[in-house]
Every structure is written in structure tokens, then in C-alpha cells.
Image (tube, helix red, strand yellow):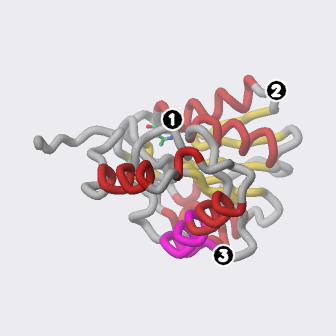
Amino acid sequence: MSTYFTPGPSHLYPGVERFIADALRDGVMSVSHRSAAFSRIFDRAVDNLRTLMTIPQDYRIFFVGSASEAMERTIQNMAESRTHHFVNGAFSERFFLMARELGKQATETRAPWGKGFTRKQMTAVPEGVELVTFTHNETSTGVMLDLEGVYACKRAHPDALIALDVVSSAPMVPLDFAFLDCVFLSVQKALACPQVLA
Ligand SMILES: Cc1ncc(COP(=O)(O)O)c(C=O)c1O
């Protein structure tokens, strides 16, 4: 097997082939999604993810089709009108443009591709903004933001909700959920699972 460095989908975790074979053998693919058996599988996935990422008990975990869908749901559910976005590459820009497409009054702090933001920039968010979005690791350029800057933004604007895209950094970087209201990731990056789930 060759080794390559791309934004993903990454090489599958070596156990995936066996996990899929076990699931087929145990009939998991034909379990009704309304059955108690499926609830047990679902609860186990939620519990394991909560443990892996130390997600507090009062945070809900949702499974959706992709991180792009998670972005859309975040914008739709966490802001009525005003959003602010830190844009420094393709994915953070997609977050910003999606908010505009969804009819939000979206503003941005922009940095050149390949650059990040100063702490001063990260705490300077227009007053009255409901949702602030950051892309922790901007996969299109490889720039990783300083999480302390994200947390400082929450401290400076406690009434704003903070959403953090951790698609290409989770679950490798510990997160402090005291300063985060929503995070999302896709399974095909550092989790090294088959794609099409976030
Ligand atoms: C930082 C970041 N956000 C969002 C996405 C979109 O993820 P998905 O392909 O699951 O929609 C990607 C995909 O590479 C990404 O790297």
C-alpha cells in the first residue's frame, strides 16, 4: 500500500474491512432503523464518540450526510439573521457563502489564503452577531488556527454562538467545549472511516 498526503478521503483504518465483514455477517445492514437493536448500535456509536472527543453530556450528537450538510444545518439552526465568518481558504469561504445563500446577513473577516488570524482579529466580531464560524484547520491551505484565539472570541462575545469546523483536525486535537457551541467533522479524514457521514 502506498502512503500519500492529501486532504482526504484518507486511507481507511486497517480494521475497516473486518468491521464491514462482521456487520454483514451479523445482519447489521438489514436491522430496522426503528428497532431496539439499531438503538443499541446508535447509542454505542454516540457513547464512543463522546468518550473519544470528551464531548460533555449536555451536548447533542447528530449524524448527517457530510460536513457540508453540517455547515448548512449549523447556519440554519444557530442564527436567525446575523452571522460572522473567519475566511482564509476554500472551506471557510464555503461556510461564509453558504450563510449568504441561506439569506443571512453574513459578514466576514478575511485573511489571504495561506495565512491565519491574529488574536486581535479573532476577538473583533461585530456587536449583535448571533453566530461566529471558524475553520480550525483550513484543509485547502493547511493553516491551523490557534484554538486559544477561538476561545478568546467566546470570552469577548459570550452571547454569540461559536461553531468550529474540525473536519480535518478532529479527533487529534483536544477541544475545550466550555468555549464552543457546535463542532462538526467528517468521518473520512482523521477517523479514517468510509466516507459519507459527518
Ligand atoms: C475543513 C473542511 N470543511 C468542510 C469540508 C467538507 O466536507 P464534506 O466533504 O464531508 O462535505 C472539508 C472537506 O475536505 C474540509 O476539509
Secondary structure of the residue carrying tag 1 is helix
Which residue is at 59% across, 71% downward?
Answer: 47
Mark nearest the camera among 3 and 2 is: 3
Magenta part of the protein: which range?
Answer: 45-55
Q: Amino acid at mark 1?
A: Phe
Q: Main secondary structure of the magenta part?
A: helix
Disc number at residue 91?
Answer: 1
Which residue is at 82% across, 51% downward?
Answer: 127
User: Within the image, what quadrant is residue 94 found in?
Assistant: top right
Disc number at residue 35?
Answer: none
- What distance separates the C-alpha of mark 2 from that of mark 1? 19 Å
- What distance separates the C-alpha of mark 1 from that of mark 3? 27 Å
Which residue is at 58% across, 68% downward?
Answer: 44
Q: Amino acid at mark 3?
A: Pro
Q: Position of residue 146 (x, y in %)?
A: 46, 61
Q: Residue furthest left?
A: 2
Label 3 Cα neighbours within 10 Å, binned few <14 / some 14-19 / many ≥20: few
Q: Amino acid at mark 2?
A: Gly
What residue is disc 2 on? 103
Magenta segment: does it hold 22?
A: no
Disc nearer the start of the sequence (1/3): 3
In this rendering, position of residue 181 left or right of residue 47? right
Disc nearer the start of the sequence (3/2): 3
Q: Nearer the viewer, residue 84 or 14?
A: 14
Disc number at residue 56?
Answer: 3
Magenta segment: does it hold 51?
A: yes
